[in-house]
Image (tube, rainbow, N blue to C red):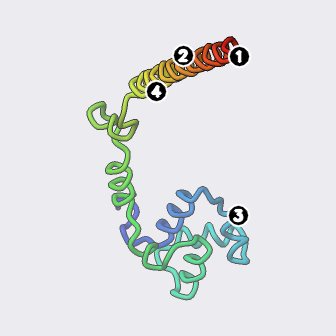
């Protein structure tokens, strides 16, 4: 006899979904209005009444179909297709730009703004000098 659980073992599927949701048997028992031993017995049962399955699904925050269709293989496929740990694709989940390049670009923009500010200040000082010279000439004439 094989020790592997059958693919349609509803109790085992409930157990795995509960574990994936980081929920203890006690918490599921409380949500169902029962005790931990009853949850343990249920998780070891190959079949469960439909009414009870509806209650369990609600307590786990999933649909009855999600429990019935749950498979370890599907979960592993989702994880495998979502999180790539090989070096070739890991880059695609990080920054799409070089932060150092952006920092240098921002610094260069600051320098340009500073240069424009200095130029504007020189022009303003020059205009003030010209105004002062003009006013001095006016006073000397009188």
Q: Quadrant of the N terminus?
A: bottom left
Mark 1 burial class by Cα count in 10 Å: few <14, some 14-19, many 20+: few
Which of the 4 image quarters holds residue 43? bottom right
Q: Which residue is mark 1?
A: 142
On the image, the x and y values in percent for residue 85 come to 35, 37
> In the picture, residue 41 is in which quadrant?
bottom right
Foreground of the two, 67 or 100: 100
How far apart are labels 3 and 4 at the CA level? 55 Å
Q: Closer to the observer: label 2 or label 3? A: 2
Circle on res. 122:
2
Disc 3 target residue = 26
- Label 2 vs label 4, nearer the camera: 2
Q: Circle 3: is it few (<14), some (14-19), or many (20+) Cα within 10 Å?
A: some
Indicate the position of residue 87 as horizontal and vertical percent values: 30, 30
Residue tagged by mark 4? 106
Q: Which secondary structure, mark 4?
A: helix
């Amino acid at each position: 006899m094989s020790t592997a659980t059958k693919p349609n073992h509803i109790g085992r599927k409930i157990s795995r979904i509960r574990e994936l949701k980081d929920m203890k048997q006690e918490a599921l028992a409380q949500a169902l209005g029962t005790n931990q031993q009853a949850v343990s017995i249920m998780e070891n049962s190959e079949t469960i009444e439909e009414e009870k399955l509806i209650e369990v699904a609600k307590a786990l925050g999933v649909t009855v179909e999600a429990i019935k269709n749950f498979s370890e293989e599907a979960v592993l496929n989702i994880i495998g297709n979502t999180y790539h740990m090989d070096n070739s694709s890991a880059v695609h989940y990080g920054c799409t730009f070089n932060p150092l390049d952006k920092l240098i670009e921002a610094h260069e923009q600051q320098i340009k703004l500073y240069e424009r500010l200095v130029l504007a200040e020189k022009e303003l000082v020059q205009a003030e000098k010209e105004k002062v010279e003009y006013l001095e000439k006016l006073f000397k004439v009188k």
